[in-house]
Amino acid sequence: MCPLPLAAAAVAAPRAPLRLLGRGLAAAMSTARPLISVDYEVFGEVQGVCFRMYTEGEAKKIGVVGWVKNTSKGTVTGQVQGPEDKVNSMNSSAPDTW
């Protein structure tokens, strides 16, 4: 077996970008309020229940930006950025149970 075709395919394959939340950093930076950035990891039953899609939708509604992804540990990790009050409201908009 020759590893060359596999290596060439890996180089040629396009990388899937992380799913970005919101409308981009420019939208969050258009405010005069100070901006914060919060890294998070969510544990429990969060994969296979549309958690990332829900998070993206909430971020758009609230007006924050960031990213979210599944991990190999069965958790979801991400980062949310924006004005402090909006970032804090992302935390309070999370459902209690899934």
Image (tube, rainbow, N blue to C red):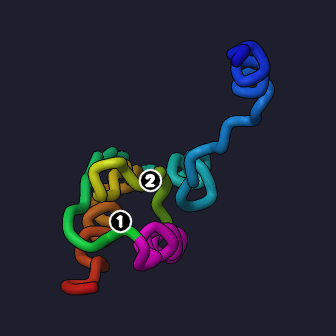
Q: Tag 1, which secondary structure? A: helix
**Residue 84: x and y, percent?**
29, 56
Residue sitting at x 33%, y 45%: 37
26 or 43: nearer the viewer: 43
* Visible residue check, residue 33: no
Q: Quadrant of the N terminus?
A: top right
> Is 55 colored magenta in this rendering?
yes
> Is 65 colored magenta in this rendering?
no
Residue at the disc numbered 1: 86
Q: Where is residue 75, by image quadrant?
A: bottom left
Whole-Å distance between the Cαs marked 2 and 1? 21 Å
Q: Tag 2, which secondary structure? A: strand
**Residue 90: x and y, percent?**
33, 69
20 or 11: nearer the viewer: 11
Lower sequence index among marks 2 and 1: 2
Give the magenta-colored segment's residue range: 48-62
* Visible residue check, residue 49: yes
Instruction: Name the kind of residue labelled 1 in the image.
Output: Lys
Q: Which mark is residue 39?
A: none
**Residue 52: x and y, percent?**
46, 67
Q: Quadrant of the C terminus?
A: bottom left
Q: Which mark is residue 69?
A: 2
- Compared with 89, 42 (above or below) is above
Q: Is residue 81 rendered to the left or right of residue 93?
A: right
Instruction: Name the kind of residue labelled 2 in the image.
Output: Lys
Numbered disc in front, either 2 or 1: 2
User: 10 Å neighbourhood of mark 1: few (<14), some, or many (≥20)?
Assistant: some
- Compared with 36, 51 (above or below) is below
- Compared with 25, 9 (above or below) is above
